Amino acid sequence: MRQKRFSKLFILVRVLAVLLGFIPLIMLFPLVMAISLGEKIMIGSFAAPMFITLALSLASIFSLRRKKLHLNAKDGFLLVFLSWVLASLIGAVPFMFCGLGFTDSFFESACSFATTGATTITDIESFPYSLLLWRSIAHWFGGIGIILVSVALLPVLGIGGFQLLKAEETGPEKEKFTPKIMVTAQLLLLAYSSLTFILFCLYLFGGMSRFDALCHSLTTMATGGVSIKNSGLAAYSSVFNDAVTTVFFLLAGINFSIYYRLLMGKFRDILNNTEIKVYIGIFITASLVLTLSLLPEYGSLPTALRYASFHCASIISTAGGAVVNYENWPAFSKMILFILMFSGGCSGSTAGGFKIIRHVVLWKQMRSSMKQLIYPQGVFNIHINKRVGRKDVVYGAAGFLFIYFSLVAIVTLVTALSGVDVFSSFCAALSMTGNIGGGFGIAGPGHNYNVFADHIKWFYSFVMIAGRLELWTVFVLFTAVYWRR
């Protein structure tokens, strides 16, 4: 029995090496840039981890080539979590070569793969171009998901991929909308890549250089919200770029299966989608209210609408980017953005947070429970997408609500213990758990995460990865029942 368990563990380690084989492939692009620009210090920072990881991955691929493997849910949870941690560790190497300490380097790498948009860097423009490209690529790759990309090729190795997809994909309901998981992953990647390319072209049209347009399109579609400029998108002073970014923040926060249905002409499914209607409704309502509250501040309706819509889209999609310091806004205006930090994007999107669908489910269940109080003998069901919702989805949303805000409370407490004021601690906790990056107080746009102690940054790195993987995937590993045979 013990020999069988070690054999299974050895196979899982090799599968993990296969999954991480994508890291050196995407490192190839910044390596080529470092060579072409003569950034000598960066060449080794990409080449060393790239070739070591690639060698391990190729060895694992050949060793698994003739084996038929079947992964269960337990294997999927462990592989997904370890993939994200090790990817962040490998991705930290280039940052260390640029002078950042190990803690800050790992934090930056974890932020990138978790698409959180936080940073400890005060002068990003002083960093080599190849590192800026790597940071943007890591965001983009984290957005689509290491595992989601991997399952497109795993069937070639005879490894069932749906267990991995269920562990990584965001949202309470995991949906395989095509018969084969490889086709599903390829369609999602196609939609993601197509939107990124369109955004790249629009940024070029808006006056950005090719390099700037590439980096910003990668991070925007990943809802990372970071920039290669110290002042972010504000450096371009472009109404067009701000408007385009606003639209694509929203598009990136929508369930990507919607784009598949759009291509297939299934418009009725889109019109009946409850989550999208609520998502867009919240954005429009918040933007209008925020615009009206900012009119006295800017004295111009177009300007107020520009900043209101951008920051509402940024927060609701958990991108966390900013073009002005919204902490200088009136209290009511700031409160609107603060409330949006509790929402999150749609399930199955690159956005983090609590997710709109869970709010919808719990709201409908609350109404159903109130009707039950008035009519005790009645039978009431919740309806989602004009179909009767399953009870297990309600239970899952309720359980997630508890674990989500329990983690927010714990992160707030740990941060406050380091001497940070309570409000900043709470905003940082919401930002890290929901992968937003932005916030208020010390976590606001006028500061960065360099002010936090090293042990807080390590804790935040774990929280970001857990939040990116929907919490369940990570915290199930800490239960006794998971490790029982």
Image (cartoon, rainbow, N blue to C red):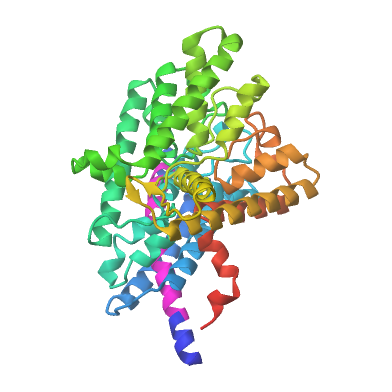
Tell whether 370 sits left or right of 36: right
Q: Position of residue 107 (x, y in %)?
A: 60, 49
Which residue is pictured at 46% across the width and 39% down the height? 223
In this view, the residue farthest toward the top is 299
On whether residue 89 falls in the magenta region, the answer is no
Label total for image: 0
> Main structural element of the magenta stretch: helix, strand or loop?
helix
Which residue is pictured at 34% across the width and 32% down the height? 200
The foreground one among 232 and 402 is 402
Tell whether 56 sits left or right of 201: right
Span highlighted in magenta in the image: 9-34
Which residue is pictured at 39% across the width and 32% down the height? 248
Which residue is pictured at 62% across the width and 43% down the height? 430
Q: Is residue 34 above or below residue 455?
A: above
Q: Position of residue 12 (x, y in %)?
A: 44, 75
The foreground one among 38 and 109 is 109
Q: Can residue 92 be seen in this view?
A: no
Q: Is residue 111 above or below residue 221?
A: below
Q: Position of residue 126 (x, y in %)?
A: 57, 33
In this view, the residue farthest toward the left is 265
**Residue 244 lies in what quarter of the image?**
top left
Q: Position of residue 261 (x, y in %)?
A: 24, 44
Tell whether 434 sits left or right of 83: right
Q: In this view, does 95 lie above or below 204?
A: below
Q: Is residue 338 visible?
A: yes
